Image (cartoon, rainbow, N blue to C red):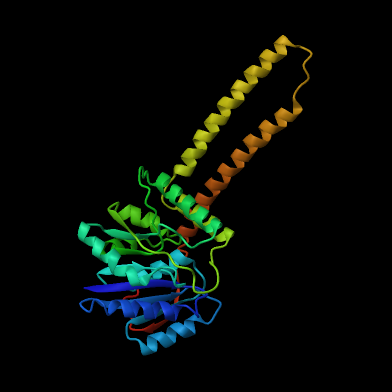
Amino acid sequence: MKISFVIPCYRSEHTIEIVVNEIEDTMKQRPEYEHEIVLVNDGSPDNVWSVISKLAEKNSHVIGINLAKNFGQHCALMAGYNNVSGDYVVSLDDDGQTPACEVFNLIDAFENGYDVVYASYPETHQNAFRRWGSDLAKKMSDYMFDIKGDDNKGSSFFVCKRFVIDEIIKYEHSYPYIAGLLMRVTRNMGFVNVNHRDRIEGKSGYSFKALVSLWLNGFTAFSVKPLELGAYLGFFTAIVGFVYAIITIIRRIINPKMMAGWSSTISVILIVGGILMVMLGLVGEYIGRIYICINNSPQYVIKDIAGQKTTNKQ
């Protein structure tokens, strides 16, 4: 059996070697498993590619992939998935927060018949904004994929069986959303509690803009439910407007001298106009994604590969 580790790297020149060393020490506990470590440089502005190249030179288990520019974490994962050869594929972060030393706790959970096993953090070492973002992403995924009654929350640290990865990499469009792709393949997922750690250094690369972009990608990648939600909202607004119009007419009949309510009229116009603009924006987002996909915009572009090359499907 072989385990493939896939790690997107961004601003991690001082941490990635620590993560690799932890994986190597952990794998020594189970010598019956072979392993490889695929490090994907996602257009990082620091010197992380140089560090990855040196790791690949001195460690035969390390494969480095250098993307031509920053494509985003999920595209970097897809680049890694297209270059693995393991029976199990592990995804984790480059900042040391995900405890690679507990990977066998996740792998052992496959004995229960799961196809995907997530690390779940009872307590996260993140700021309030990131915790709120994670909770919102969880609620969004539950709504998009009709998941009910499941309080387990996944993370960026998870293990998949090979058939799941083989199915995921068939998706070649430029807006991959890993959680959505996993849900399209299987709902047979397990969760194992592990300890979340502090970052070794620095801060999260996910700014508010990046998180909004990720949420928008999740909302529009695999479902038309945002459009359905807009239709319901429009229907509700129309009913409210109709009821308000009846109330206005009745009040006018009772009191003919009643002054017209300009402020209320403007408020209604702003509310309706705002809803229309939001829905037009969503429709435009869908159309824009269709346009980009039709033009075959690349999911990722590999510039260099260091270490032993396995497969290179693009």
Q: Which of 119/217 is in front?
A: 119
> Can you tell which quarter of the image residue 245 is in?
top right
The structure residue drawn at horizontal position 67% and vertical position 15%, both measured from the top left corner, is: 249
Q: Which of 280/90 is in front?
A: 90
Give the residue at the far top of this rendering.
Answer: 254
Residue 164: x and y, percent? Answer: 29, 61
175 lies above or below 61: above
Q: Is residue 284 left or right of residue 59?
A: right
Q: Is residue 35 left or right of residue 63?
A: left
268 lies above or below 49: above
The structure residue drawn at horizontal position 56% and vertical position 25%, both measured from the top left corner, is: 239
Q: Which of 241/97 is in front?
A: 97
Quarter of the image for the N terminus: give it: bottom left
The structure residue drawn at horizontal position 52% and vertical position 58%, both measured from the top left corner, is: 130
Q: Which of 295/122 is in front?
A: 122
Residue 7: x and y, percent? Answer: 40, 72
Residue 40: x and y, percent? Answer: 43, 75
The structure residue drawn at horizontal position 48% and vertical position 43%, both measured from the top left corner, is: 226
Residue 313 visible in this rendered orientation of the protein: no
Residue 201: x and y, percent? Answer: 53, 74
190 lies above or below 43: above
Q: Is residue 6 left or right of residue 15?
A: left
Residue 155 visible in this rendered orientation of the protein: yes
How many callouts does the rendering have? 0
